[in-house]
Amino acid sequence: MSGRSSSRIWGLHLAVLAALLAAGWLLPEYHRGVFSRVMVLAVFAMGYNLLFGYAGLLSLGHAMFFAAGLYGAGLPLYHLGWGVPAAFAAGVAAGGALALVVGALALRTVGVAFMIVTMMFSQVVYLTALYFTTWTRGEEGLVLSPALRRIDLGGTVVSLSDPAARYVIAFVLFSAALLLSLRLVRSPFGRTLAGIRENEERMRMLGYDTFRAKLAAVVLSGLFCAASGAAYGLLFGYVGSGFASIQYSILPLLWVLVGGAATTLGPLLGTAFMFYVVDYASGLTSAYLLLVGAALILTVLFFPRGVLGTMRERWLKWLP
Amino acid sequence: MAALASPTETPLIETRALSRGFGGLKAVDNVDFRLRAGEIRALIGPNGAGKTTLVGLICGRIAPSCGTILFQGRDITRLPAHARVMAGIAYTFQITSIFPKLSAYDNVALPVQRRLLAQGRARAHDLDAGVAEALEKVGLCGRASTPAGDLAYGHQRLLELAMGLALKPRLLILDEPTQGLSDGEIETFVALARAIAGEATVLIIEHNMQVVMELAQTITVMNAGRILAEGTPEAIRADRAVQDVYLGSHGHG
């Protein structure tokens, strides 16, 4: 870990953040809206990447953590009239608590069993959201009115339905998540997770309590995903059970695979790429999933380890 | 046995009536084994004698069916493997077990940071120093940035040894460390093992009798899950029973 590669890494990440910040002013209205969503969802992907890319644990149930954030923030805001900051904190806490319980149980299994167990837990969360229709209004969902989505900053009121404010908040969340994940993966804990991914038995015989390390990774991952879910609900004003469905467990996996597993910037790239491919394809034909599938096949063909993963393998060895 | 360890001295490792069965087979059968601090002990015996199972029981990879294991007089029978490593028992695998996709630096950084974290914090400076020290000992300093999987086989075995050393263990268990090494590499290894013995007790499973005779102060011979004989290399060489089951009829490849 030389000082030169370290400053290069921080330089790259700060440059990406600066470009995103500038884009907030430069992009046309429509694309600014898209990017607000992409940045929030990229935090979801980053949380997924932490577990899948770095610790090597493939979960098929991460929709439950996104949904825990979404409902954890949305329900108290809608029913109890909580403020936005308190609702956000509740969403993140709900995701962390859920991840702790699910992690403690699911980590007793490995491989395919782990995939199935996480998927089952996620289905439980999905069905729970559908079952308590009185509170959640099921598939129809809750619309959080703009009047509820305001932050009072000592006199100045920021409305989360204002696109400019939305972009800035999404940017702040994304920046925090990116810098935190960069620090995490370059820390001893990041190396521990990579060790577990590569050879868990050896890690145990090097004195690591691998169960605890994996549980910590699940909880951290859950916190990231819940923060994304809570922000998504609060910024875009809708909380529905669709976000807890299996589709939202598969999406972060796709985003991470396309962008590059175990790369810090891959989740952003993958999320943005998929968002625009779906957007463009659905403008052309109603059979847009066919085009999305073709685009995915081409990506995997030319970038077998995802865009950034393949670039790291071939040219940019220093990429974190 | 009584002549080897004075009765007042607490052995580093002691097993009492230790057994482990797999199905109907008793891989380790009622074994009382003692290891003094500071010695180099070789564990030999024909294939299937229970050597790897015995060290597996000692380091916690395998749970015993019954019996007790004491480390420095403390009962560690119920302690999980990772906690035994932190107590000072390091194990290097019979089949090379490294992190092939991580650099040689990271391979050694993992045990170093584990040791540093147990003491408090893993500062970058201490980590670098610890990794350099361990790689230096096995002569792999120049390979720090090479992915471990790209190293030559002999170097991978040395890297695994460096990982064990980086933990600064009280007891280092080496399971067939010279398997697959060239004669030159074996010579390097023997010199290295002698140097290690200055800092840690070494328990070595080995098939190469030349290495065993050169290194070990005491040899324990196992057969069919039991300890058949124990003594100095000369005594073991002269032992009839050992000659029958091991040295004579089976050879050692």
Image (cartoon, coloured by chain):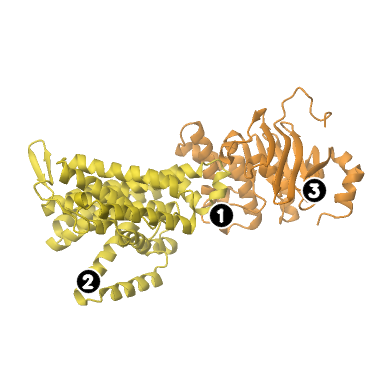
Host chain of mark 1? B
Chain A tint in image: yellow
Q: Decide: few, some or many residues near mark 2? Use Cα within 10 Å; few <14, some 14-19, many ≥20.
A: some
Q: Badge 3 local density, few (<14 within 10 Å), some, or many (20+)?
A: some
Q: Residue at 37% of width from left, 53% of height from top?
A: A121
Name the residue: 25% across, 64% down.
Answer: A275
Residue A178 visible within the image:
no
Which image quarter holds the N terminus of chain B?
top right
Q: Chain of mark 2?
A: A
- Residue kind at label 3, given as amino acid type: Ala
User: Mark 2 highlights which residue?
Assistant: A280
Q: Looking at the image, is mark 2 or mark 3 nearer the viewer?
A: 3
- Determine the colour of chain B: orange
- Above or below, B88 against B243 in this view is above
Which of these two is toward me, A24 or A201?
A: A201
- The reply, left or right, for residue B193 in relation to residue A250 is right
Tag nearer the camera, 1 or 3: 3
What SS does tag 1 mark? helix
Task: Give the CA distance from mark 1 to mark 3.
Answer: 37 Å
Q: Is residue A96 above or below residue B200?
A: below
Q: Which residue is mark 3?
A: B224
Q: Position of residue B116 (x, y in %)?
A: 51, 35
Q: Which residue is mark 1?
A: B148
> Residue B163: x, y in percent?
59, 44
Amino acid at the residue labelled 1: Ala
Query: In this rendering, would A56 be left or right of A36?
Result: right
Q: Are marks 2 and 1 on the same chain?
A: no
* Residue at figure coordinates x 34%, y 45% from the top left: A98
